[in-house]
Amino acid sequence: MTRHKQDGLTMNLFDSLDAGELWQEALCPGAAVLHGYAGDGRLLLPAVHDVTTLAPFRQMVTPSGFRMSVAMSNCGSFGWLSDKSGYRYGSTDPLSGRAWPRMPDSFARLASAAAAQAGFDGFEPDACLINRYEPGARLSLHQDKDERDFSQPIVSVSLGIPAVFLFGGLSRTDPAIRVLLTHGDVVVWGGPARLRYHGVMPVKEHNHPIMGRCRINLTFRKVM
DNA sequence: CAGTACCT
DNA sequence: TCCG
């Protein structure tokens, strides 16, 4: 996998693997893990609270009728939604009928800086999906393909208790590498990795000093 | 777009 | 299993 920048914070997904998985090395161009890039999250957590007070976490339903284990909210111009009629982005929160809360400046700055760090300059997200995982919550392998412009990367910020991130290939049945993500880690994928399947293993019981038994993930996207 | 068989 |  391509190493986009050479510094102490940036490593590629391959660096998280053990020797038994070295064969994957050539399969991860366009993806990077920035361990600790978001620091202790102290600029982000009050903003998460503010957003989710206006747009509370809710468990969405998939088109096939399953209730997702992850609770979600959104901020920015567009919010990702799932219900029985499908997946899509919308500019209003169905729960309130009002626009999603505006994206906090701290969110946008972090996402743009992380993208640039990974080699994607000029990333200006217009959507931030906020995912809340409690122990047992998971997200099965999927592709992010509800956005218009796949030239724009995805930036994912992890806060709270650890989770194993799955990063697969362009086909659902391709093998997935596993990356442990902890509080402050940021993953960026784009370019040739933009449509790679990814997901999160069921989150294990754990306690984080400030987040308790909770993991929050911020996923930044350019929708329009 | 609903939801079976599958076996992660 | 179109983000169980």
Image (tube, coloured by chain):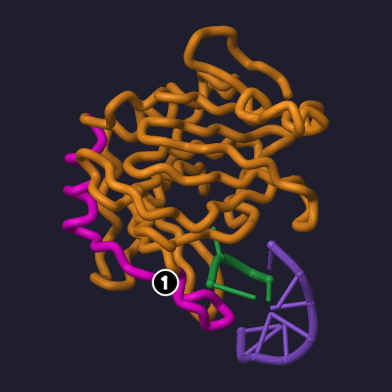
Chain colours: A orange, B purple, C green
Quarter location, residue A107: top left
Q: Give the range drawn in magenta.
A: A43-68
Is residue A41 placed above or below A49 in the rendered structure? above
Tell me how many marks there are. 1
Identify which residue is drawn at 58% across, 20% down.
A11
Q: Is residue A33 left or right of residue A151?
A: left
Where residue A141 appears, x then y in whole percent? 63, 57
Q: For residue A192: magenta?
A: no
Q: For residue A45: magenta?
A: yes
**Which residue is the site of mark 1?**
A60
Identify which residue is drawn at 49% across, 43% down.
A221
Q: Is residue A200 left or right of residue A24?
A: left
Kindly give the residue lying farthest to the top in the view shown. Answer: A7
Is residue A73 placed above or below A117 in the rendered structure? below
The quarter of the rendered structure image containing the N terminus of chain A is top right
Image mark 1: chain: A
Identify which residue is drawn at 52% across, 75% down.
A62
Where residue A124 appears, x then y in whole percent? 45, 33
Identify which residue is drawn at 74% across, 35% down.
A192
Residue type at mark 1: give it: Met
Badge 1: residue crowd in 10 Å (few <14, some 14–19, many ≥20):
some
Where residue A17 appears, x then y in whole percent? 66, 30
Q: Is residue A159 left or right of residue A96?
A: right
